[in-house]
Image: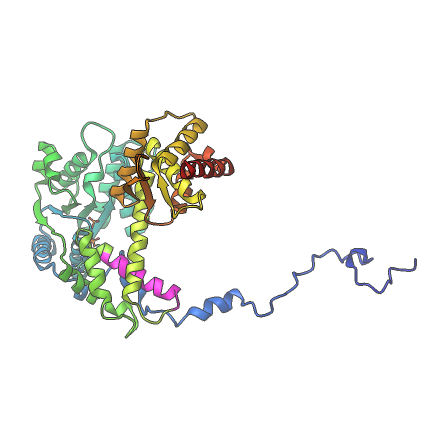
Amino acid sequence: MPGNDTGTSDSAHSDDPDDTAVDPPVDDNSNQKTIRELLEEDSGKSVFVNRNLVEPDTIIDEERIVGRDDQLQAVVAYLKPALRDERPPNMLLYGPSGTGKSLIVNAVCGQIVELCESQDINFGVVSLNCQPITTLDRAVYKLVETVAKDVGVDAGVPATGVSTEQKYERLYDLINTYYDSVIFILDEIDLLVGREDEPAYSKLLYQLSRAGKTDTIHGTVSVAALTNDPKFMENVDGRSESSFNPEDIPFSDYDANQLREILEHRRDAFRNGALSDDVIPLVAAFAAQSHGDARKGIDLFRKAGDLADRQNDDIVTESHVRDSQDEVDKDRMLTQIEGLSTQKKISLYATAAVAVHTTHTTASVPSPVGYQVYKWITELLDADQMTRETYIKYVKELNTYGIVDAERKSRGRGQGMHMEFSFSDNPRPILDLLAEDSRLTAIADETEHLKTIAQARMQKFQSS
Ligand SMILES: Nc1ncnc2c1ncn2[C@@H]1O[C@H](COP(=O)(O)OP(=O)(O)OP(=O)(O)O)[C@@H](O)[C@H]1O
């Protein structure tokens, strides 16, 4: 046949050796927007004009700090000697989460750095969050790293393979070279426990506070330790206590009015007119319920705005706040589920699976059905099998987390009583989360089987 000139456009038969490129996909939806168009479409429509202001880690101006006058004045008074090149006392700032401890100490230190600069004094602020740090050695290394980064040099010691002593030496060396005075801010100090008998925080507080007194660090040294634990000093050994010997600065919970003020001072994170009147009072009320934690309030404020943006709404309203708070509660609930024991997880899995897989009921699970499915799962996983009472007890316990409601039900005369479990929210995410536990993954492979079992048990229960 001459050529392939059949009049068709079948490119599979093309003779052109270069014609191997894959055709671009046929654009069957010419109205579809490009990524760029989609990105540009939303800009300018946000309820925020300065979203940064409602990020919890943003360093805020002094004018935005509300209701912490006593603490502010105390920290100023204690740190003022640094401006005269005299040693400030050590400090212990304690109080619940989100009550402004870091904010206050950092705000004052920031001003001291500036004032010192104008007098040609190099005041070093060395901050360390102790929460993720597991050993003293690591903490000292992190301090070296922080100073080195601040002054723009190499850490000069490796993270591993040298002694903690050598790391201390490098730390002191860096401080003596680059700073005239220094303050260490040790956040969440109580969590620096370490792996030895004597807590790592005791040793660190001892070493750092002594370094100034023994002239190991030539300039003035002060240590500010921050903790949520009001009894922290009871766990510090006598030697460290007398060396550290801090001035106490207590922080208390914020009430709803103070939280409202804090939020009012960040109102300009939002476009003018983008907040309905009830938003700030409602966010403050929710945050006051979470132990007066300003961080939670600021987070909720931002989340409500984000939700309004996602829904393309011009104004943040009460319902955005409530929906965002529901999300927060749900996330907390899922975190709690992650921490349950295996037996409790299996009990919950069985109950949630019945709710998800049986369409006959409104996600309400009679305990006899849940228990049958629980037994089937324990056999599948080769796990211990608890009694029906224990299964019921475990599921009822989840009531306290707000995951499951439990109610006693009668099936009519002579039929006896049973517990009936119902989920406050769609139980599907609970199943998905539980399936991530390596001890439970085998159930997810048997989903179809499980569904059949759950439906059969439910049918049997309903027809009995
Ligand atoms: N008085 C306040 N005025 C304005 N903002 C505040 C105030 N107190 C706290 N905040 C804000 O709340 C958030 C949490 O504050 P901060 O980190 O200082 O709390 P904390 O007491 O150190 O908490 P944690 O113990 O959890 O470390 C920050 O975003 C901070 O800016």
Name the residue: 33% across, 45% down: 422
**Is residue 274 positioned above or below 122 on the image?**
below
Foreground: 409 or 452? 409
**Is residue 197 positioned above or below 330 on the image?**
above
* Residue extending farthest front: 413
Where is residue 152 drawn, in percent x and y? 32, 51
Q: Is residue 305 magenta?
A: yes
Confirm whether residue 133 shows in the render: no
Q: Give the residues in magenta.
A: 297-312
Where is residue 31, by image quadrant?
bottom right
Quarter of the figure that contains the C terminus: top left
Name the residue: 92% across, 60% down: 2
Where is residue 5 drawn, in percent x and y? 87, 63
Where is residue 280 drawn, in percent x and y? 22, 65
In this rendering, position of residue 161 left or right of residue 107: right
* Residue extending farthest right: 1
Confirm whether residue 5 shows in the render: yes
Q: Is residue 117 magenta?
A: no
